[in-house]
């Protein structure tokens, strides 16, 4: 499987009412195959957030933003950074069990 196939597999396995462990594993494998694949970081960050792992989610979302900036896509990077900030606010509001 290539990185794109793994991300697609992970997306299908990601959900609010699901154990996102397999999705996270698929995204991680995609990142191992292609460390510059920003979508894999973005989706893995989402899966971490849904799995009550907000700090890992923020880390991945920020990595996605860094990759977007490096690609010359600062507007998309700003969207990612706002997403990370939303997660941070969720931590402060007690939206995650820690």
Image (tube, rainbow, N blue to C red):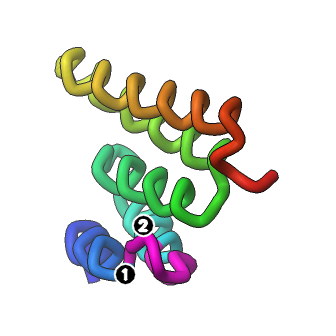
Q: Could you classify mark 1 by the number of other residues whose Cα lies within 10 Å: few (under 14), some (14-19), or many (20 or more)? A: some
Tell me residue 44's x, y (percent): 45, 58
Q: Is residue 78 above or below residue 1?
A: above
Q: Is residue 42 magenta?
A: no
Tell me residue 95's x, y (percent): 64, 46
Foreground residue, 5 or 53?
Answer: 53
The quadrant holding residue 79 is top left
Q: Residue at x 29, y 71 (%)?
A: 11
The quadrant holding residue 1 is bottom left
The total of numbered circles placed on residues is 2
Circle on res. 13: 1
Q: Is residue 21 magenta?
A: yes
Tell me residue 9's x, y (percent): 29, 80
Residue 20 appears left or right of 91: left
Circle on res. 27: 2
Magenta-drawn segment: 14-23
Residue 68 appears left or right of 23: left
Q: Earlier along the polypeptide chain: callout 2 or callout 1? A: 1
Foreground residue, 16 or 78?
Answer: 16
Q: Is residue 19 above or below residue 66?
A: below
Q: Residue at x 54, y 37 (%)?
A: 87
> Given contact means CB atoms under 8 Å apart, are the residues at marks 2 and 1 in contact?
no
Q: What secondary structure is found at the residue carrying circle 1? A: helix
Q: Main secondary structure of the magenta part?
A: loop
Q: CA separation, marks 2 and 1?
A: 10 Å
Q: Is residue 54 above or below residue 12?
A: above
Q: Is residue 50 above or below residue 14?
A: above
Q: Residue at x 56, y 78 (%)?
A: 21
Circle on res. 76: none
Q: Residue at x 44, y 54 (%)?
A: 46
Q: Could you classify mark 2 by the number of other residues whose Cα lies within 10 Å: few (under 14), some (14-19), or many (20 or more)? A: many
Tell me residue 13's x, y (percent): 37, 81
């Amino acid at each position: 499987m290539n990185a794109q196939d793994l991300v697609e597999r992970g997306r299908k396995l990601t959900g609010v009412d699901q154990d996102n462990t397999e999705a996270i594993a698929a995204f991680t494998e995609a990142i191992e195959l292609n460390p510059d694949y920003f979508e894999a970081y973005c989706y893995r960050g989402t899966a971490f957030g849904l799995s009550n792992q907000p700090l890992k989610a923020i880390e991945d979302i920020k990595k996605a933003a860094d990759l977007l900036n490096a690609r010359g896509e600062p507007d998309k990077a700003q969207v990612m950074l706002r997403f990370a900030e939303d997660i941070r606010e969720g931590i402060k509001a007690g939206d995650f069990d820690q």
